[in-house]
Amino acid sequence: MSGGTPVGGGRFMRQRHSQGGYASSGDDLEDDACSRHRTFLPPPPPRRTWIEMLENFLWLASAAFILYFGDQHSNLIYLLCHDDRIRRLPLYLGMIGIGLNVLIFIYTTILAWSVRRFGEAWGLKKWEITSISVLPFATVFGIISFCLFSFALWPIWSFLTIPLLFTLFMACMVVIPYIIFGTLRPQYDEFRTD
């Protein structure tokens, strides 16, 4: 180490005498590393394997098949609106449960978006507490809604109702990440103070 001011024990401490450099000979290139502008590149998106893409396609194709063919006489949307075999009260209560789940997810997404955007430390803690505290409610609403839908649609498909509802649920899980309009994408804004 060249130059510097001796500090106890024979070590040297560098002192900055001006903005131009140190009191040393200037041969240390790493001294300027902290004042250089660093660019942060976003991490590359996770690469999907062909097996994952095939699974997603199968869930979506199965859900489209269920929606289009329904009970082989009419499609599922028409059945839900006009078929007298469906028990209406459990169907409507299940839809209310799904609506409450959607509201919970929208609220936590907006809260997470505001935390990411403004970068507030107290907001991050608030988001963590809120997301953890509403998770049991979302789970209970989802399970109750699934049971209510199963009970409401049992007269049409009997024991096939459960795999049909599970297939529709999995298709929703495949589609939902693409519906979120980049609210949770990482932001790489760098604020410099020097």
Image (spheres, helix red, strand yellow):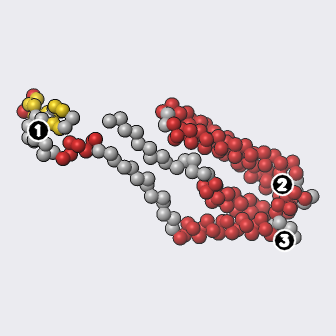
Q: Which residue is mark 1?
A: 24
Upstream in sequence: badge 2 or badge 1: 1
The answer to the question of whether label 3 and label 2 lie on touching residues, with beta carbons closer than 8 A, is no
Residue where numbered disc 3 is placed: 72
- Front-most of residues 187 and 67: 187
Q: Earlier in the sequence, mark 3 or mark 1?
A: 1
Quarter of the N terminus within the rendering: top left
**Sooner in the amino-acid sequence: mark 3 or mark 2:** 3
Q: Look at label 2 and name its amino acid.
A: Ala
Kindly identify the residue that appears in the image at 15 percent across and 34 percent down: 14
Q: Residues at badges 3 and 1 in contact (C-beta under 8 Å)?
A: no
Residue type at mark 1 is Ser
Instruction: Please name which of the two marks, 2 or 1, marks the residue nearer to the observer.
Output: 1
Residue 112 picture location, percent across and down: 56, 41
Q: How far, Cα to Cα, is label 2 from label 1?
A: 82 Å
Residue 49 at what x, y percent from top left? 51, 68
Left or right placement of residue 67 versus residue 176 in this view? right
Q: Which mark is residue 152?
A: 2
Of residues 37 and 63, the one drawn nearer to the viewer in this rendering: 37
Image mark count? 3
Residue ID at (63%, 59%)? 174
